[in-house]
Amino acid sequence: MRTKGFTAAIAEETRESGTVYYIVTVPENADGTAGTLLRNAGFECYPVYGD
């Protein structure tokens, strides 16, 4: 993602079952188009809204 110009952070989460999940987050840009840019760059993404 970084090579395509995105700022990404990776978090690791271990569930009770022992399965480890890696969560990659990319902050929204000023235009509100980060999701579209990610999809156009070939990444699958899901918007998450929060505080």
Image (tube, grey):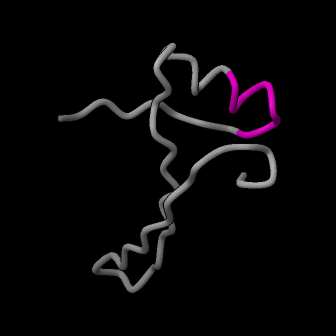
Placement of 17 over or under 29, stated as above or below: below
Q: Position of residue 38 (x, y in %)?
A: 69, 32
Residue 30 falls within the magenta-colored stretch: no
Residue that lies at the very extreme toward the left in this rendered image: 51
Placement of 8 over or under 17, stated as above or below: above
Residue at x 48%, y 50% (from the top left corner): 25
Residue at x 56%, y 54% (from the top left corner): 8
Q: Position of residue 36 (x, y in %)?
A: 65, 20
Q: Which residues are magenta?
A: 37-43
Q: Position of residue 27 (x, y in %)?
A: 45, 39
Placement of 8 over or under 12, stated as above or below: above
Residue at x 37%, y 73% (from the top left corner): 13
Placement of 32 over or under 49, stated as above or below: above
Q: Position of 18 compared to 31: left or right?
A: left
Exactly how many numbered labels are in the figure?
Answer: 0
Residue 42 falls within the magenta-colored stretch: yes
